[in-house]
Image: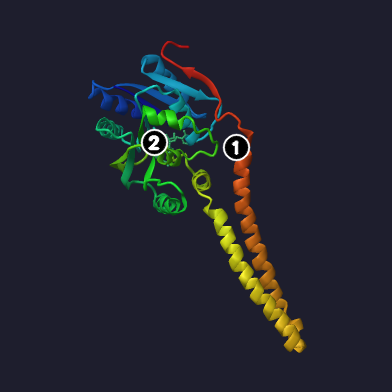
Amino acid sequence: MFVSYVLPVYNEQDGIQRFHDELVAALAERPDITYELVYVNDGSADGSLSILRDLAKNDPQVQVIDFARNFGHQIAITAGIDQATGDAVIIMDTDLQDPPKVSLELIEAWREGAEIVHARRRTRKDTFFKRITAHAFYRMLRSAAEVDIPLDTGDFRLLDRKVADELRKFRERGRFVRGIVASLGFRQTEVLFDRDERFAGETKYPLRKMARLAIDGVTGFSTMPLRLITRLGVVVLLLSLLGIAYAVGMRIFRPDITVSGWTMTMVVTLFLGGTQMLSLGVLGSYIGRTYTEAQARPLYIVRQVIRHDGD
Ligand code: UDP
Ligand code: MG
Protein backbone atom coordinates (compact mmCIF):
# COMPACT_ATOMS: atom_id res chain seq x y z
CA MET A 1 0.00 0.00 0.00
CA PHE A 2 1.46 3.20 -1.29
CA VAL A 3 0.80 6.51 0.44
CA SER A 4 1.63 10.01 -0.86
CA TYR A 5 2.29 12.85 1.54
CA VAL A 6 1.55 16.36 0.27
CA LEU A 7 3.67 18.82 2.19
CA PRO A 8 3.37 22.60 1.56
CA VAL A 9 6.41 24.65 2.52
CA TYR A 10 6.61 28.42 2.77
CA ASN A 11 9.64 29.87 4.55
CA GLU A 12 10.11 26.92 6.91
CA GLN A 13 13.93 26.72 6.83
CA ASP A 14 14.26 26.35 10.63
CA GLY A 15 11.79 23.55 11.02
CA ILE A 16 11.66 21.61 7.80
CA GLN A 17 14.60 19.27 8.45
CA ARG A 18 13.25 18.37 11.87
CA PHE A 19 9.80 17.80 10.39
CA HIS A 20 11.23 15.54 7.70
CA ASP A 21 13.24 13.52 10.21
CA GLU A 22 10.21 13.00 12.44
CA LEU A 23 8.01 11.97 9.56
CA VAL A 24 10.56 9.51 8.20
CA ALA A 25 11.13 8.11 11.70
CA ALA A 26 7.40 7.61 12.20
CA LEU A 27 7.11 5.86 8.84
CA ALA A 28 10.15 3.69 9.56
CA GLU A 29 8.17 1.98 12.30
CA ARG A 30 5.73 0.79 9.67
CA PRO A 31 7.68 -1.08 6.99
CA ASP A 32 4.41 -2.29 5.45
CA ILE A 33 3.71 1.25 4.22
CA THR A 34 5.59 2.46 1.17
CA TYR A 35 5.42 6.15 0.56
CA GLU A 36 6.42 9.21 -1.42
CA LEU A 37 6.86 12.68 0.03
CA VAL A 38 5.74 15.47 -2.29
CA TYR A 39 7.05 18.74 -0.94
CA VAL A 40 5.67 21.88 -2.55
CA ASN A 41 7.95 24.87 -2.20
CA ASP A 42 5.46 27.73 -2.34
CA GLY A 43 7.90 30.44 -3.39
CA SER A 44 9.88 30.49 -0.14
CA ALA A 45 12.19 33.46 0.18
CA ASP A 46 14.48 31.76 2.72
CA GLY A 47 16.71 28.69 2.53
CA SER A 48 13.86 26.18 2.42
CA LEU A 49 14.44 25.24 -1.21
CA SER A 50 18.07 24.23 -0.79
CA ILE A 51 17.15 22.08 2.22
CA LEU A 52 14.40 20.42 0.18
CA ARG A 53 16.79 19.95 -2.73
CA ASP A 54 19.14 18.04 -0.44
CA LEU A 55 16.30 15.89 0.85
CA ALA A 56 15.37 14.95 -2.71
CA LYS A 57 18.98 14.28 -3.63
CA ASN A 58 19.45 11.83 -0.77
CA ASP A 59 16.13 10.06 -0.94
CA PRO A 60 14.31 8.70 -4.00
CA GLN A 61 11.05 8.83 -2.06
CA VAL A 62 11.18 12.63 -1.96
CA GLN A 63 10.24 14.99 -4.73
CA VAL A 64 9.93 18.75 -4.67
CA ILE A 65 7.59 20.87 -6.73
CA ASP A 66 9.16 24.30 -6.87
CA PHE A 67 6.66 27.10 -7.55
CA ALA A 68 7.74 30.15 -9.53
CA ARG A 69 6.32 32.37 -6.77
CA ASN A 70 4.15 32.23 -3.68
CA PHE A 71 0.66 31.04 -4.63
CA GLY A 72 -0.68 30.34 -1.15
CA HIS A 73 -1.28 27.29 0.95
CA GLN A 74 -4.51 26.12 -0.74
CA ILE A 75 -2.93 26.23 -4.20
CA ALA A 76 0.22 24.52 -2.91
CA ILE A 77 -1.71 21.54 -1.60
CA THR A 78 -3.63 21.42 -4.88
CA ALA A 79 -0.39 21.11 -6.84
CA GLY A 80 0.78 18.38 -4.48
CA ILE A 81 -2.44 16.41 -4.94
CA ASP A 82 -2.12 16.82 -8.73
CA GLN A 83 1.34 15.28 -8.56
CA ALA A 84 0.70 12.54 -5.99
CA THR A 85 0.27 8.99 -7.24
CA GLY A 86 -0.42 7.07 -4.00
CA ASP A 87 -3.37 4.82 -3.17
CA ALA A 88 -4.02 7.38 -0.47
CA VAL A 89 -2.94 11.01 -0.19
CA ILE A 90 -2.21 12.68 3.14
CA ILE A 91 -2.08 16.46 3.34
CA MET A 92 -0.24 17.92 6.31
CA ASP A 93 1.53 21.10 7.42
CA THR A 94 5.30 21.08 7.64
CA ASP A 95 5.69 23.10 10.84
CA LEU A 96 5.11 20.07 13.13
CA GLN A 97 1.72 21.38 14.22
CA ASP A 98 0.24 18.30 12.59
CA PRO A 99 2.17 15.50 14.35
CA PRO A 100 3.62 12.94 11.89
CA LYS A 101 2.51 10.04 14.13
CA VAL A 102 -1.12 11.05 13.72
CA SER A 103 -0.82 10.44 9.98
CA LEU A 104 -0.38 6.75 10.79
CA GLU A 105 -3.70 6.81 12.61
CA LEU A 106 -5.27 8.31 9.49
CA ILE A 107 -3.86 5.41 7.48
CA GLU A 108 -5.33 3.00 10.03
CA ALA A 109 -8.80 4.52 9.64
CA TRP A 110 -8.42 4.35 5.85
CA ARG A 111 -7.56 0.66 6.04
CA GLU A 112 -10.69 0.11 8.04
CA GLY A 113 -12.71 1.40 5.10
CA ALA A 114 -12.91 5.19 5.34
CA GLU A 115 -12.37 7.10 2.10
CA ILE A 116 -11.80 10.50 3.68
CA VAL A 117 -10.24 10.79 7.12
CA HIS A 118 -10.26 14.24 8.72
CA ALA A 119 -7.82 14.95 11.52
CA ARG A 120 -9.83 16.98 13.99
CA ARG A 121 -8.21 19.14 16.64
CA ARG A 122 -9.18 18.16 20.12
CA THR A 123 -6.98 20.91 21.51
CA ARG A 124 -4.70 23.44 19.90
CA LYS A 125 -1.76 25.42 21.16
CA ASP A 126 -2.10 28.69 19.32
CA THR A 127 -2.42 32.27 20.44
CA PHE A 128 -5.65 33.23 22.18
CA PHE A 129 -6.58 35.42 19.22
CA LYS A 130 -6.07 32.62 16.72
CA ARG A 131 -8.07 30.18 18.81
CA ILE A 132 -10.99 32.59 19.21
CA THR A 133 -11.12 33.60 15.54
CA ALA A 134 -10.75 30.01 14.34
CA HIS A 135 -13.47 28.82 16.70
CA ALA A 136 -15.87 31.53 15.51
CA PHE A 137 -14.93 30.98 11.88
CA TYR A 138 -15.66 27.25 11.86
CA ARG A 139 -19.05 27.80 13.49
CA MET A 140 -20.02 30.71 11.26
CA LEU A 141 -19.04 28.75 8.18
CA ARG A 142 -21.03 25.75 9.31
CA SER A 143 -24.18 27.81 9.64
CA ALA A 144 -23.65 29.65 6.33
CA ALA A 145 -22.32 26.94 4.05
CA GLU A 146 -24.48 24.61 2.05
CA VAL A 147 -22.18 21.66 2.68
CA ASP A 148 -21.36 19.99 5.96
CA ILE A 149 -17.85 21.15 6.73
CA PRO A 150 -16.50 19.33 9.78
CA LEU A 151 -15.75 21.52 12.80
CA ASP A 152 -12.19 22.27 13.95
CA THR A 153 -10.45 20.59 11.06
CA GLY A 154 -7.88 22.30 8.91
CA ASP A 155 -6.36 20.67 5.86
CA PHE A 156 -4.74 17.76 7.70
CA ARG A 157 -6.52 14.75 6.23
CA LEU A 158 -6.23 11.58 4.21
CA LEU A 159 -7.92 11.11 0.86
CA ASP A 160 -8.41 7.81 -0.87
CA ARG A 161 -7.22 7.65 -4.50
CA LYS A 162 -10.84 7.86 -5.72
CA VAL A 163 -11.38 11.05 -3.69
CA ALA A 164 -8.12 12.64 -4.83
CA ASP A 165 -9.10 11.99 -8.46
CA GLU A 166 -12.47 13.68 -7.94
CA LEU A 167 -10.87 16.60 -6.10
CA ARG A 168 -8.53 17.15 -9.03
CA LYS A 169 -11.49 17.98 -11.25
CA PHE A 170 -12.24 21.10 -9.19
CA ARG A 171 -10.18 23.89 -10.72
CA GLU A 172 -11.61 27.00 -9.07
CA ARG A 173 -9.16 29.69 -8.05
CA GLY A 174 -10.72 30.91 -4.83
CA ARG A 175 -10.10 27.54 -3.30
CA PHE A 176 -11.28 26.30 0.02
CA VAL A 177 -10.03 22.76 -0.24
CA ARG A 178 -11.63 21.40 2.91
CA GLY A 179 -15.03 22.64 1.71
CA ILE A 180 -14.61 20.94 -1.66
CA VAL A 181 -13.57 17.72 0.05
CA ALA A 182 -16.55 17.83 2.40
CA SER A 183 -18.88 18.38 -0.55
CA LEU A 184 -17.67 15.23 -2.32
CA GLY A 185 -19.49 12.81 -0.08
CA PHE A 186 -17.81 9.38 0.24
CA ARG A 187 -17.32 7.60 3.55
CA GLN A 188 -15.87 10.20 5.89
CA THR A 189 -14.56 9.73 9.40
CA GLU A 190 -12.43 11.75 11.75
CA VAL A 191 -9.49 11.08 14.01
CA LEU A 192 -8.99 13.34 17.03
CA PHE A 193 -5.57 14.75 17.81
CA ASP A 194 -3.90 17.41 19.93
CA ARG A 195 -2.40 20.11 17.78
CA ASP A 196 1.11 21.03 18.75
CA GLU A 197 2.82 24.35 18.77
CA ARG A 198 4.64 25.50 15.67
CA PHE A 199 8.18 24.12 15.97
CA ALA A 200 10.02 27.09 14.45
CA GLY A 201 9.27 30.38 12.77
CA GLU A 202 6.00 32.23 12.77
CA THR A 203 2.59 31.55 11.33
CA LYS A 204 2.41 32.08 7.57
CA TYR A 205 -1.28 32.89 7.95
CA PRO A 206 -1.51 36.49 9.06
CA LEU A 207 -4.95 37.97 9.64
CA ARG A 208 -5.13 39.14 6.02
CA LYS A 209 -4.70 35.62 4.64
CA MET A 210 -7.06 34.16 7.22
CA ALA A 211 -9.73 36.68 6.25
CA ARG A 212 -9.28 35.82 2.59
CA LEU A 213 -9.58 32.09 3.33
CA ALA A 214 -12.72 32.79 5.36
CA ILE A 215 -14.24 34.78 2.47
CA ASP A 216 -13.37 32.02 0.00
CA GLY A 217 -14.96 29.54 2.37
CA VAL A 218 -18.20 31.48 2.66
CA THR A 219 -18.54 32.74 -0.93
CA GLY A 220 -17.45 29.40 -2.37
CA PHE A 221 -20.04 27.39 -0.51
CA SER A 222 -22.89 29.73 0.23
CA THR A 223 -24.92 32.52 -1.29
CA MET A 224 -26.24 33.44 2.12
CA PRO A 225 -24.64 36.92 2.08
CA LEU A 226 -26.60 37.67 -1.10
CA ARG A 227 -29.81 36.52 0.52
CA LEU A 228 -29.01 38.62 3.58
CA ILE A 229 -28.90 41.68 1.32
CA THR A 230 -32.46 40.97 0.24
CA ARG A 231 -33.57 40.72 3.84
CA LEU A 232 -31.68 43.82 4.76
CA GLY A 233 -33.30 45.57 1.81
CA VAL A 234 -36.77 44.60 2.99
CA VAL A 235 -36.11 45.88 6.50
CA VAL A 236 -34.65 49.15 5.21
CA LEU A 237 -37.54 49.59 2.83
CA LEU A 238 -40.08 49.16 5.64
CA LEU A 239 -38.22 51.66 7.80
CA SER A 240 -38.02 54.08 4.87
CA LEU A 241 -41.77 53.82 4.30
CA LEU A 242 -42.34 54.66 7.96
CA GLY A 243 -40.00 57.63 7.61
CA ILE A 244 -41.78 58.83 4.48
CA ALA A 245 -45.18 58.55 6.15
CA TYR A 246 -43.83 60.49 9.11
CA ALA A 247 -42.31 63.22 6.91
CA VAL A 248 -45.44 63.63 4.79
CA GLY A 249 -47.68 63.56 7.87
CA MET A 250 -45.64 66.32 9.53
CA ARG A 251 -45.77 68.41 6.37
CA ILE A 252 -49.56 68.20 6.26
CA PHE A 253 -50.45 68.43 9.95
CA ARG A 254 -47.59 70.45 11.45
CA PRO A 255 -46.28 72.67 8.62
CA ASP A 256 -45.02 75.15 11.24
CA ILE A 257 -42.18 72.86 12.38
CA THR A 258 -41.26 70.90 9.24
CA VAL A 259 -38.06 72.83 8.57
CA SER A 260 -36.59 71.27 11.65
CA GLY A 261 -36.22 67.96 9.79
CA TRP A 262 -32.43 68.10 9.62
CA THR A 263 -31.83 65.20 12.01
CA MET A 264 -34.27 63.03 10.10
CA THR A 265 -32.58 63.84 6.79
CA MET A 266 -29.16 63.00 8.15
CA VAL A 267 -30.29 59.75 9.74
CA VAL A 268 -32.04 58.54 6.61
CA THR A 269 -29.21 59.55 4.28
CA LEU A 270 -26.51 57.95 6.38
CA PHE A 271 -28.50 54.81 7.01
CA LEU A 272 -29.37 54.29 3.37
CA GLY A 273 -25.84 55.15 2.28
CA GLY A 274 -24.40 52.64 4.75
CA THR A 275 -26.65 49.78 3.78
CA GLN A 276 -26.07 50.45 0.11
CA MET A 277 -22.30 50.42 0.49
CA LEU A 278 -22.47 47.23 2.47
CA SER A 279 -24.66 45.59 -0.15
CA LEU A 280 -22.40 46.73 -2.94
CA GLY A 281 -19.46 45.24 -1.10
CA VAL A 282 -21.15 41.87 -0.86
CA LEU A 283 -22.16 41.98 -4.53
CA GLY A 284 -18.62 43.03 -5.39
CA SER A 285 -17.08 40.03 -3.69
CA TYR A 286 -19.23 37.65 -5.71
CA ILE A 287 -18.66 39.55 -8.95
CA GLY A 288 -14.91 39.59 -8.29
CA ARG A 289 -15.02 35.87 -7.78
CA THR A 290 -16.91 35.38 -11.04
CA TYR A 291 -14.34 37.55 -12.81
CA THR A 292 -11.28 35.67 -11.61
CA GLU A 293 -12.93 32.34 -12.38
CA ALA A 294 -13.87 33.57 -15.85
CA GLN A 295 -10.23 34.45 -16.55
CA ALA A 296 -9.47 30.76 -15.99
CA ARG A 297 -5.76 31.32 -15.63
CA PRO A 298 -3.53 28.45 -14.58
CA LEU A 299 -3.76 27.82 -10.87
CA TYR A 300 -0.01 27.73 -10.36
CA ILE A 301 3.25 27.89 -12.22
CA VAL A 302 5.98 25.36 -11.52
CA ARG A 303 9.61 26.31 -12.03
CA GLN A 304 10.79 22.71 -11.82
CA VAL A 305 10.08 19.38 -10.21
CA ILE A 306 13.13 18.13 -8.34
CA ARG A 307 13.61 14.39 -8.09
CA HIS A 308 16.30 12.03 -6.91
CA ASP A 309 17.64 11.33 -10.39
CA GLY A 310 18.08 15.02 -10.94
CA ASP A 311 15.67 15.68 -13.76
N1 UDP B 1 2.03 27.68 3.66
C1 UDP B 1 2.21 27.70 2.27
N2 UDP B 1 1.99 28.88 1.61
C2 UDP B 1 1.58 30.02 2.23
C3 UDP B 1 1.35 29.97 3.64
C4 UDP B 1 1.58 28.77 4.31
O1 UDP B 1 2.57 26.71 1.66
O2 UDP B 1 1.41 31.05 1.56
C5 UDP B 1 2.27 26.41 4.39
C6 UDP B 1 3.19 26.50 5.60
O3 UDP B 1 4.53 26.32 5.27
C7 UDP B 1 2.67 25.40 6.49
C8 UDP B 1 1.19 25.34 6.15
O4 UDP B 1 1.04 25.98 4.90
O5 UDP B 1 3.23 24.14 6.18
C9 UDP B 1 0.32 26.01 7.19
O6 UDP B 1 0.77 27.33 7.43
P1 UDP B 1 0.92 27.90 8.90
O7 UDP B 1 1.49 26.86 9.80
O8 UDP B 1 1.67 29.18 8.84
O9 UDP B 1 -0.58 28.20 9.30
P2 UDP B 1 -1.23 28.05 10.76
O10 UDP B 1 -0.86 26.70 11.26
O11 UDP B 1 -0.64 29.15 11.57
O12 UDP B 1 -2.69 28.22 10.49
MG1 MG C 1 1.01 26.00 11.41
Cβ of mark 2 under 8 Å from ligand 2: the answer is no
| Residue 122 in the image, given as x and y percentages of width and height | 30, 47
Residue 236 vertical position relative to residue 11 in the rendered view, above or below: below
Residue 272 vertical position relative to residue 252 in the rendered view, above or below: above
Residue 306 relative to residue 292: left or right: left
Residue 194 relative to residue 211: left or right: left
For discs 2 and 1, the disc positioned in front in the rendered view: 1
Residue 163 relative to residue 284: left or right: left
| Residue 102 in the image, given as x and y percentages of width and height | 28, 35
- Please name whichever residue, 184 or 6, is drawn nearer the observer in this view of the structure: 184
| Residue 305 in the image, given as x and y percentages of width and height | 48, 19
Report if residue 147 is visible in the image: yes
| Residue 15 in the image, given as x and y percentages of width and height | 38, 31
Q: Which residue does the numbered mark 2 point to in the structure image? A: 200
- Disc tally is 2
Residue drawn at x 54%, y 39% as measured from the top left: 174
Q: Quadrant of ligand 2?
A: top left
- Please name whichever residue, 20 or 300, is drawn nearer the observer in this view of the structure: 300
Residue drawn at x 30%, y 40% as measured from the top left: 189
Colour theme:
rainbow
- Please name whichever residue, 177 or 305, is drawn nearer the observer in this view of the structure: 177
Q: What amino acid type should be assigned to the residue bearing mark 2?
A: Ala
Q: What amino acid type should be assigned to the residue bearing mark 1?
A: Glu
Under tag 2, what secondary structure?
loop
Looking at the rendering, which quadrant does residue 278 occupy?
bottom right
The answer to whether the residue labelled 2 contacts the one labelled 1, judged by CB atoms less than 8 Å apart, is no
Under tag 1, what secondary structure?
helix
Please tell me how crowded label 2 is: few (under 14), some (14-19), or many (20+) other residues with Cα within 10 Å: some
Looking at the rendering, which quadrant does residue 81 occupy?
top left
Residue 293's disc number: 1
Cβ of mark 1 under 8 Å from ligand 1: the answer is no
- Please name whichever residue, 15 or 78, is drawn nearer the observer in this view of the structure: 78
